[in-house]
Image (tube, helix red, strand yellow):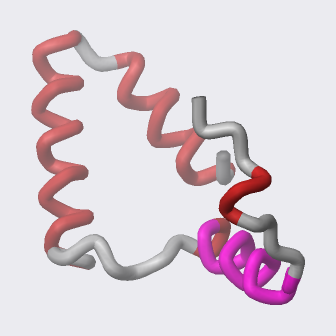
Amino acid sequence: MSTATRKIVDLMEILPESEQNFALEFVKKLVLAWDPDFTKLTPAERKELDEAMADRETIPHDAIDWD
């Protein structure tokens, strides 16, 4: 968790529960305004995706125990 995110969580925990719900809804609106289709990646997601794409190892479908 980033330092900024940790600070936001700490501040939200100070609020009464009813105000926490308001703040959560506000943050949801901010995220939707920034990325209405949830297609953008956070820096951490971008790093994970880049690492996964660089790893060319694959696992055959029949090698997975699906049960």
Q: Residue lying farthest front?
A: 62
* Quadrant of res 45: bottom right
Task: Provide residue 46's location: percent of width, then percent of height.
Answer: 63, 79
Q: How many marks?
A: 0
Instruction: Name the residue located 19 percent from the left edge and 76 percent from the top edge.
Output: 37
Check the image and report above or below for 36 versus 56. Answer: above
Q: State left or right for residue 2 relative to residue 55.
A: left
Q: Give the range drawn in magenta.
A: 45-56
Where's the C terminus, which quadrant? top right
Residue 45 to residue 11: above or below = below
Query: Which residue lies at the image location 36% right of the left edge and 28% below the top edge?
Result: 12
* Front-lying residue, 67 or 57: 67
- Residue located at (67% from left, 77% from top): 49
The overriding secondary structure of the stretch rendered in magenta is: helix
Can you say whether 62 is above or below 44 in the image?
Answer: above
Horizontal side of residue 8 vs 21, given as left or right: right
> Residue at the location (43% across, 30% down)?
11
Q: Which of 18 and 66 is in front in this view?
A: 66
